[in-house]
Image (tube, helix red, strand yellow):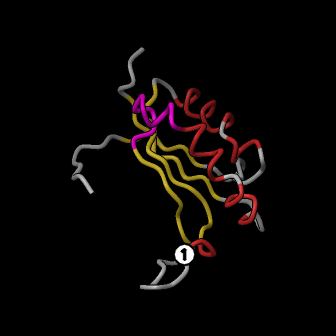
Amino acid sequence: MSQDNEFLVRLPDMPDVLETRIANRPLHLMHNQQHFASGKIAFGGPFYSSQPEDGEESMSKIIGSIHLCKACTEKEVWQMIRDDPYAKLGVWDLERTVVTPMKVFVSKPL
């Protein structure tokens, strides 16, 4: 199965879910290990209400997640989203989630 298509996925959090997010982060990461290993998720992480300043605690500024997914179809991406513990536990607001087809042409290692 080809994984040539790339999708930028913006997953906003529901209101007041920070404690649920933090408590279930290990489960979320464990679930996604298979996707990291296979390359289906090229990168992922939280996005913030504003950039945390030096020394500032960043967890309280988390308002969602962002992923770069590689999949055959958008439908496959949505299945990956729905299967994630954050989706099942109501952390992500699936009504406001945006899956955007895109293509990475330039990438620099972090």
Which residue is pictured at 24% across the width and 49% down the height?
A: 107
> Total number of numbered labels?
1
In magenta segment, residue 88: no
> Which sits in the foreground, 94 or 55?
55
| Residue denoted by label 1 | 58
Q: Residue at x 63, y 75 (%)?
A: 60
User: Which segment is the magenta one?
Assistant: 33-42
Quarter assignment of residue 13: bottom right
Viewport quadrant of the N terminus? top left
Q: Where the C terminus falls, by quadrant?
A: bottom left
Q: Main secondary structure of the magenta part?
A: helix
Q: Is residue 100 left or right of residue 78?
A: left
Picture coordinates of residue 65 (x, y %)? 56, 56
Relative to 86, 50 lies left or right: left
Q: Residues within 10 Å of mark 1 (few under 14, many from 20)?
A: some
Does residue 91 sit above or below 78 in this rendering? Answer: below
Reply above or below: 109 against 105.
Answer: below
Q: Position of residue 10 (x, y in %)?
A: 55, 52
Indicate left or right for 1 with 61 as reference.
left
Front-most of 109 and 78?
109
Residue 102 in percent (x, y) is at 39, 42
Residue at image location 67% in from the left, 34% down from the top: 83
Q: What amino acid type is highlighted by mark number 1?
A: Ser
In the rendered image, residue 14, in percent from the top left (x then y), is placed at: 74, 60
Q: Secondary structure at mark 1?
A: loop
Q: Residue at x 63, y 30 (%)?
A: 79
Residue occupying the far top of the picture: 1
